Image (cartoon, grey):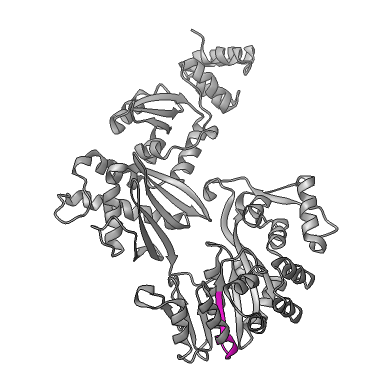
């Protein structure tokens, strides 16, 4: 039978002379060939792994070319993976088979332990020990902690006992504790991963847990379908929902503390074809509201917004689609101007952050408290500054205009794609042009984009065609006299191999000037309004994004993803 060194020679990875040396050393010292080859660094780890695959007659697997399986990860804790130098690749539940990457496929004690631990037959494949270690550190860190895996396994092992927390249910105390533990770890992971939302979604045969991290949904866990109802019931109990009502959507709220973090969770349930889906929005109570500069607003745009904010009256609008950070920007502005000398009242749906010293009101349409009725009441509260969560109809628009014309500073949001589109939208709602022209002082549009992770950032020369497009869009904003570099993140365990870490805003701020007022009176199109704004020096969303690309803050792909016209 050929030895490991013979196989390496046949593959062209090792010379015959070096193979003879390996065999001689093995005879003299009794050291295995693999150890000698590794100690003397005769071949790369990958070539050695491929030779071992031939030697042991098992497949070689390149871990970097396969996606991690949350189901496989849930079967085996990281402790076990580290102890035996193994990594779970995939699982076949029907055939009760677990494919396992192993540094040593002849480690029978490891195979026996995993088979007894999981109840699955192990199919071994060879992989590099360093890659196994790297992937265990990375993929388990991106997945839910081993405690959740163990809790899920324990609950699943007695699935016949698992019921939801309904009155009269025969649900064991230990199992109830385990469900609570699973929920707790799902929440703790969300905080560690900087997630803004958690989605618990029932499927036909399983339940998946997804997290929105830096604006992108990522699947992190698959749990048995049998415990879904128990999980949902636990969340509903915490958030004050009715656990016996599964036919209609419900909303709730609860508090969660982990380490130094104090988190408010806004919870929504929705009946779907496979059961109730739960979405939890995480709202940090600690850490304070970021400043406008920290959000990514700077230069001419920041100055124009600050000038508008310092005026005693007028309307300032923040525009953008859902999830573009409009509320955070409003909170930042309010925090900046919040003093004991002004009376600030807000009307929100819902109140996301509580700001000391600000009178915040939650709308309640069922009780007759809408944006319009609330705004009408606000005017009798002697306010200086009014924040209306959103202008949705003509009545709210008219009242906001009247409030600004009677000496109040009004902030609100509007769902339009850019700043120039806000004025035609308000005119379409029925607002009078002459009132708009005299009341609106500034309109800002925004998006949020992912930032390149500083620790894995690398520069590269951009494609000539893309560089020309960026140059044409920036015009005189294009920096001259230096080599232009674009940047990207190569990915590492800290950023979940995404290459991105955190988010920043891109903005366009359009002050309403005298020339702009004339266009409003003429009911001009958004294209005409944008042209005038650009002629007057407005930096557009895309331009702000491109400038942040040139500074190495974000990638060109990210700007095109969120700001493509």
Q: As drawn, which residue projects farthest toward the top?
A: 1
Q: In this view, does 483 lie to the left or right of 155?
A: right
**Magenta span contains residue 406:** yes
**Magenta span contains residue 231:** no
Residue 2 appears at what percent x and percent y? 51, 9
In which quadrant of the rendered view does residue 119 lie? top left
Residue 477 lies, with reference to residue 434, above or below; the image says above
**Which residue shows up at 60% across the image and 62% down it?**
447
Front-lying residue, 151 or 505: 505
Residue 465 lies, with reference to residue 434, above or below; the image says above
Residue 398 lies, with reference to residue 213, above or below; the image says below
Asked if residue 503 can be seen in this view, the reply is yes
Query: What residue range appears in magenta?
Result: 403-412
Residue 259 appears at what percent x and percent y? 38, 62
Q: In this view, does 195 lie to the left or right of 290?
A: left
Front-lying residue, 473 or 213: 473
Residue 58 appears at what percent x and percent y? 46, 19
In which quadrant of the rendered view does residue 426 lie? bottom right
Front-lying residue, 354 or 40: 354
């Amino acid at each position: 039978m050929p030895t490991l060194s013979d196989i390496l020679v046949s593959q062209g990875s090792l010379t015959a002379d070096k193979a003879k040396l390996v065999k001689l050393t093995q005879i003299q010292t009794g050291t295995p060939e693999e150890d000698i080859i590794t100690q003397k660094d005769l071949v790369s780890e990958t070539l050695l792994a491929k030779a071992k695959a031939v030697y042991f007659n098992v497949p070689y697997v390149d871990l970097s070319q396969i996606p991690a399986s949350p189901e496989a990860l849930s079967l085996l804790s990281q402790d076990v993976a580290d102890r035996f130098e193994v990594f779970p690749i995939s699982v076949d539940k029907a055939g009760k088979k677990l494919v396992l990457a192993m540094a040593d496929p002849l480690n029978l004690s490891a195979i026996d332990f995993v088979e007894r631990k999981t109840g699955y037959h192990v199919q071994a494949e060879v992989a590099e020990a360093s890659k196994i270690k790297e992937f265990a550190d990375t993929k388990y860190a991106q997945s839910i902690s081993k405690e959740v895996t163990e809790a899920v396994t324990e609950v699943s092992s007695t699935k016949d006992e698992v019921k939801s927390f309904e009155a009269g249910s025969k649900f064991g105390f230990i199992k109830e504790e385990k469900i609570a533990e699973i929920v707790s770890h799902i929440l703790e992971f969300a905080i560690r991963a900087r997630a803004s939302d958690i989605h618990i979604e029932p499927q036909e045969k399983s339940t998946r847990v997804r997290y929105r991290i830096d604006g992108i949904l990522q699947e992190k866990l698959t749990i048995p379908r049998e415990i879904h109802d128990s999980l949902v019931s636990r969340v509903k109990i915490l958030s004050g929902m009715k656990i016996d009502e599964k036919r209609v959507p419900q909303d709730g709220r609860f508090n969660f503390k982990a380490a130094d973090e104090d988190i408010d969770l806004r919870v929504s349930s929705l009946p779907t074809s496979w059961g109730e889906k739960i979405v939890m929005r995480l709202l940090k109570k600690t850490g304070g509201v970021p400043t406008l500069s920290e959000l990514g607003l700077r230069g001419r745009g920041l100055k124009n917004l600050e000038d508008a904010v310092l005026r005693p009256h007028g309307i300032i609008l923040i525009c953008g689609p859902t999830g573009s950070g409009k509320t955070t920007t409003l909170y930042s502005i309010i925090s900046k101007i919040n003093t004991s000398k002004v009376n600030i009242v807000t009307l929100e749906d819902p109140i996301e952050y509580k700001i000391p010293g600000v009178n915040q009101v939650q709308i309640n349409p069922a009780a007759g408290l809408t944006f319009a009725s609330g705004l009408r009441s606000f005017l009798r509260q002697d306010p200086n500054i009014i924040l209306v969560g959103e202008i949705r109809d003509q009545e709210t628009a008219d009242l906001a205009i009247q409030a600004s014309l009677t000496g109040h500073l009004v902030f609100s949001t509007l769902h339009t794609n850019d700043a120039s589109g806000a004025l035609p939208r308000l005119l379409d709602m029925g607002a009078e042009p002459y009132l708009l022209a005299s009341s609106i002082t500034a309109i800002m549009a925004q998006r949020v984009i992912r930032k390149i992770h500083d620790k894995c950032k690398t520069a590269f020369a951009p494609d000539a065609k893309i560089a020309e497009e960026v140059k044409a869009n920036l015009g005189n904003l294009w920096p001259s006299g230096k080599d232009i570099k674009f940047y990207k993140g190569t990915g590492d365990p800290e950023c979940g191999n995404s290459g991105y870490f955190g988010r920043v805003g891109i903005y366009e701020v359009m002050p309403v000037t005298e020339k702009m007022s004339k266009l409003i009176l003429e009911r001009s199109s958004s294209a005409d309004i944008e042209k005038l704004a650009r002629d007057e020096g407005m930096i557009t969303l895309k331009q702000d994004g491109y400038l942040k690309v040139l500074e190495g803050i974000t990638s060109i792909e990210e700007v095109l993803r969120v700001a493509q016209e």
